[in-house]
Every structure is written in C-alpha cells, then in structure tokens.
Amino acid sequence: MSSSSALAELPQLDRRTLGDTTYEALSDLLAAGRLAPGDRLSLRRSAAVLGVSVMPVREAVSRLVAEGALEVSPNRAIRVPTMTRVEFRALAETRMAVEGIAAARAAEQRSEEHLAEIHRTEAAFRRTAERADPDSAMAVALNRDLHFAIYAACGLPPLREIIARLWLKAGPVINLDLRAHPERLLQGFALRRHAEALRAIEARDGAGAAAAIAADIGEAAEFIMSRGGLRDG
C-alpha cells in the first residue's frame, strides 16, 4: 500500500483548535453576563483556569477585541468595554430587528424537540425570577439560554452567529444592570414577554413571536437607560 493510500484512510481531524475552544469559553462568559463592563481579563489567570498556555488565550482575546467585545486600555490591560447611551440604544435596536426575525422563523420552523427545549428554559428562568430573592447572575444566564433555545429553532445558522456576536456586547451590560437593580426581575416584564413568545411559538405565530422578543429587548433597554448606568457622549 502506498503512503498516499494509507493517508487517505485516516479520519479527518477535528479542525477546532485550542484557540477556538478558548474563544468559545470567553465568549460564554460575556454572553452569559458573567463579566461586567470595566472588568479586566488577565491572560495568565485565564490560561491557568482553562488549563491552556497563554498563546490560545491571546489568540481568543485578539478575536474578541476585533469584534468589539473586549478592548485594550491605554495601559495595555484587557477589559470589557463600557458603553455610551447612544451605543447601547443602537445595540438594542439592532437586536430587536435581528432577534425578531429569528423568533419569527423559529415559530414557523420549530420542531417538537425545539419546542420542548424552549419550554424547559422558559420554566427554568421563571423559577429563578419568581423567587423572593432571585439570583441575578443565574437569571442573566437563564435568560440567555431561553433566547438561544428560540434562535436554535430558526434554521438559519448564519443568523444565529450574528446574534451570538451581538450578545457578546449585550451580556455584560445586562449583568451589570441586574447586579445593581435586581428589582427588575420582580417587576415581571421579562416573564410576561417570555410567556408571550412561548405561546406564539407554540401557535406558529411568527409575527407574535417577533413582537414578544422585540418588546422584551426594548423594555429591558429602556429600564437600563432610565437608571443612568451608561456613559454619556
């Protein structure tokens, strides 16, 4: 057997690199709201926690800086960017449009398996948000899980990738707001909009699902901006 024939029988290797997996781990911290605007990120500490060398962490951080999810300060520290009111409003309006499209498609395309996962994540968020003293960090993560369970049903992977990048910027701001103002959960805005989205997706009502998700994003954005935690300028 020739060497060429032998090589042809080898299985394809996983194309994912340590840089890819590190990027996904850091992205999850941002999208799930486990980092807040202004938080610093140590390359060496991150590498130690992830069990990798500094090189894949540096590679992942470079990608996140290029996407605007992280920034390098004048003293070379890596940190989560802070956001102005204008920037945050633009982000919220973009999310309302893009995520509304995904929710509409999810209502029209979802399978029974997708619907079951949306039910599960909506119930998990509800249990946390309805507690007398809800865990804000867990609520942020469960809110993300519910939204992405909906978007997983839309059948458009490129659209989900766009949404994932938007959440890299949105997650830290949502987290900071709920840390400072946990009463927002008790007001029940998100619970009502999530329930509306679930009912619309069950009924295959694309317009209703889009409206519920857009309202969920818009109401949260208005609350955050009303609290004055964003920079002017």
Image (cartoon, grey):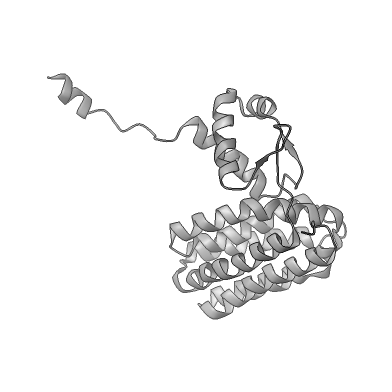
User: How many numbered callouts?
Assistant: 0
Q: Residue at x 54, y 67 (%)?
A: 98
Instruction: Give residue 175's position: percent from left, percent from top.
Output: 75, 52
User: Which of the 4 image quarters holds residue 10?
Assistant: top left
Task: Please say if 36 is above or below 230.
Answer: above
30 sits to left or right of 1: right
222 sits to left or right of 13: right
Instruction: Give residue 13's position: percent from left, percent from top.
Output: 35, 31
Instruction: Give residue 21's position: percent from left, percent from top.
Output: 52, 36
Q: Residue at x 72, y 44 (%)?
A: 35
Q: Residue at x 72, y 45 (%)?
A: 34
In-front residue for pair 122/210? 210
Can residue 205 be seen here? The reply is no
In-front residue for pair 36/206? 36
**Which image quarter is the C terminus in?**
bottom right
Can residue 140 be seen here? The reply is yes
User: Which of the 4 image quarters holds residue 126?
Assistant: bottom right
Instruction: Give residue 5's position: percent from left, percent from top.
Output: 15, 25
4 sits to left or right of 130: left
Task: Please say if 78 is above or below 190.
Answer: above
Q: Residue at x 46, y 74 (%)?
A: 108
**Which image quarter is the N terminus in?**
top left
The residue sitting at the left extreme is 1
